[in-house]
Structure formats: structure tokens, C-alpha cells
Amino acid sequence: MTYIIAGPYGSGKTEFCIHLAKEICKDKPTVLADLDVVNLSFRSREKVELLEKLGIELVAGNLDNNTGQDLPAVNYSFLSAIPANKNLIMDLAGGEPGINLLSYCYDYLKETDYEFLCVLNMFRPDAETPEKMINFVRSINNKAKIKVTGLVANGHMIHHTETEHILKNREAVIAASKILEIPHRMTIMKKSFHEELKNKIDFTEQLILFENLEMREDWQ
């Protein structure tokens, strides 16, 4: 399966990609492609050692992962994961730059099973309301040759996250999902929040649960 991950800047795409990779690598070899050529920090290539320990292959820029990180270079070798029948996660840059990159991959993607997921966090710009979420997803669908197939609720305020943030954001994503007629596929949250909510909420979507944030150290 190929997972294409898009979303507004700061929505938590990369955090989601890391935890999604940790989940799906249990069943099949997994490649995580860091395709963020815009942001200079909080990129999945920063977690290469963690990923390698889990057996997850990271593909980043054309240069060594630890050098030249400021260069907008893309290594398209990640596309070899598709004919090799590996899981592939494409961690796109936020906004339009990430969508533009997809045009170079279309001929590969159209021949494979994929999920094009949009990560939405109402506590970040461009997704503060269901209406803004809808507008963002429609803007992606208007620009990309392939269409968004599912929405991911990622309501967080980094280390200040509380259950109300998760619930409020999830409700907004569900509302946007109904208007867009695009399924709400996943919600991501810490396991401690799920323990608090599991007897109160009927989660019909897939849950991506984690112990701790990977892209933010405790002191950040």
C-alpha cells in the first residue's frame, strides 16, 4: 500500500507519518520518503536512527541524510518501493509545494493501491473550522491529478494537548468529511488520551496511538 500524506503547514503530517510507519512496518517492509523540500526543521529525515532501528527505510534528499539538508533535492528512488510491493509513505511538504511534487509520481501511483490522506488540525492555520478544512481539501483536489481519499484528525497543541483538543478537532473533521463525501479514515492521539476516551466515544475510524511525540523532544 502507498500512503500519500498532505496537509496544511504545521498540521503534524510528519509526526503522523512516523507513527503510521511504526504501525504498518509490523506487517510488511516499509519505506518512508521525506519529500519536504520547504521546511528546514521537523522533517522525518531527522529520525533516521529511530527508523533504521525499526527496520523502516528512509529516503530523503539526493545527498547524505546528514548533509545538505537545506537543499531542495528530491530522491525519487522511493518509487522503487511500489513494484517491490513494499509499504510506501510519502511525507509531502505542506501546502501547494507538496502537491506539485505529485505530478512527477503520477504514472507510478495510478497503477497501485494508494490512500491519499489529508492531515487536519484545527489549531493550525488553514484548518481552523470545518469550512476551512473543506476549502483546503478542495484546493488539493483541484490541483492534483489524484484525489484525496481520506481525512486524518490530528488535533493537538503539542505538549499542551488535552482531550478537548482531540475531540473538538475530530468533530470538525467529521463535519468536513460529510460535506466533502470523503471518509474520515484515521485519528491520531497519545495512548493515555485513548484510555480516557475509549469508553465515551465510538471510534469507527482507525486509530494511530503513540506513547510519546517523536518530532518534539520533551523540552521543546
Image (spheres, rainbow, N blue to C red):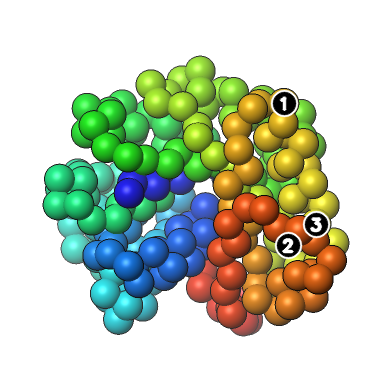
Q: Amino acid at mark 2?
A: Met
The answer to which of marks 3 and 1 sits earlier in the sequence is 3
Residue 141 drawn at (x, y percent): 51, 23
Q: Determine whether, in the image, residue 24 is placed left or right of residue 19.
A: left
| Residue 188, numbered circle | none
The residue depicted at 80 percent of the width and 61 percent of the height is 201
Q: Residue at x 23, y 56 (%)?
A: 86
Picture coordinates of residue 74, whole percent (x, y)? 25, 45
**Nearest to viewer (mark 3 / mark 2):** 3
User: Mark 3 falls on what kind of element?
Assistant: helix
Whether residue 85 is situated above or below residue 215 in the rendered picture: above
Q: Residue at x 23, y 32 (%)?
A: 111
Question: Are dots 3 and 2 in contact, CB under 8 Å?
Answer: no
Residue 6, visible in the rendered structure: no
The mark found on residue 167 in the picture is 3
Circle 2 — which element? loop
Residue receiving disc 1: 179
Q: Which residue is mark 2?
A: 157
Q: 69 or 207, which is in the foreground?
A: 207
Q: Position of residue 214 (x, y in %)?
A: 51, 73
**Cα distance between the residues tagged 1 and 2:** 26 Å
